[in-house]
Image (cartoon, rainbow, N blue to C red):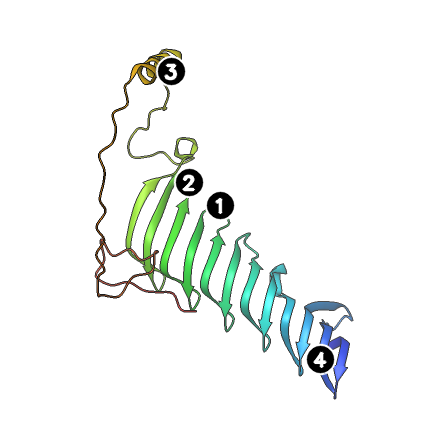
Amino acid sequence: KKRLYEGDWVNGLKHGYGVLSQVLEDGTFVLLYEGDWVKGKPEGVGRKHYPREEYYEGEVKAGKRHGHGRMWYADGSFYDGFWVDDMKDGLGLYVASNGNRYEGYWRADRKHGYGEYYHLDSGQMQYGLWNQGIAVCTNMRDIMFRQASQQPTPYPIPEVELLDPELVYETEYNRIATEQVEPEPEVVEVFSVSPGPSLSPWFYVDCCDRVFPPRY
């Protein structure tokens, strides 16, 4: 397959800024890559084009997605996060074509580590730990817009509202106005230092025997 490069050269190698295209049999050009080059390979910041109009914008190393970047897929899904050797790796956000999204850690193109998966069809958020794409220790909770979700829920969720908001406000206002504030007792705080290692804030160890930290 013939390819056409237009851009900077140094010592006979593509180096600097350049655009690489593929020449089809009918003479038309298909854009493959535009961006930075280092010693003959795409490296730095660029935009890679794939079949079916998929494309990537972000950091590139040795021709592969590496570092931070964003990927648009043909099915309408989207990823914004970190990459290692052309695979999702590290912290990233993935939005599926149906609007569901995952925010958390990845390894080798799979969910791995702590993450939060938002099920917009059911109005629930699943949070916890994933291991190689499988949820190994997660919980579910309702999210704010569950009452407007398209999928029916297994139990009814009543509308949250006050029967008489003005009366509640007036009663609470009078209570605060007439309440005598008693002085709070002096509190002496005692701290102890544990000799053991500390855990990162995102670790959830209350329900799991093992955790899977992210790789940087």
Q: Earlier in the sequence, mark 4 or mark 1?
A: 4
- Residues at marks 2 and 4 touching, judged by CB atoms closer than 8 Å: no
For the residue pair 112 and 197, the one nearer the viewer reads as 197
Q: Which mark is residue 15?
A: 4
Pick whichever of labels 3 and 1 is earlier in the sequence: 1
Residue 121 shows which numbered tag? 2
- Decide which of tag 3 and tag 2 comes sooner along the chain: 2
Q: Amino acid at mark 1?
A: Gly
Label 2 sits on a secondary structure element that is loop
Residues at circles 3 and 4 in contact by the CB criterion of under 8 Å:
no
Q: Which quadrant would the N terminus be assigned to in this image? A: bottom right
Q: CA distance from mark 1 to mark 2?
A: 8 Å
The answer to which of marks 2 and 4 sits earlier in the sequence is 4
Q: Nearer the viewer, residue 211 or 112?
A: 211
Q: Badge 4, how many Cα within 10 Å: few under 14, some, many 20+?
A: some
Front disc: 4 or 1: 4
The residue where tag 3 is placed is 169
Residue mark closest to the camera, 3 vs 4: 3
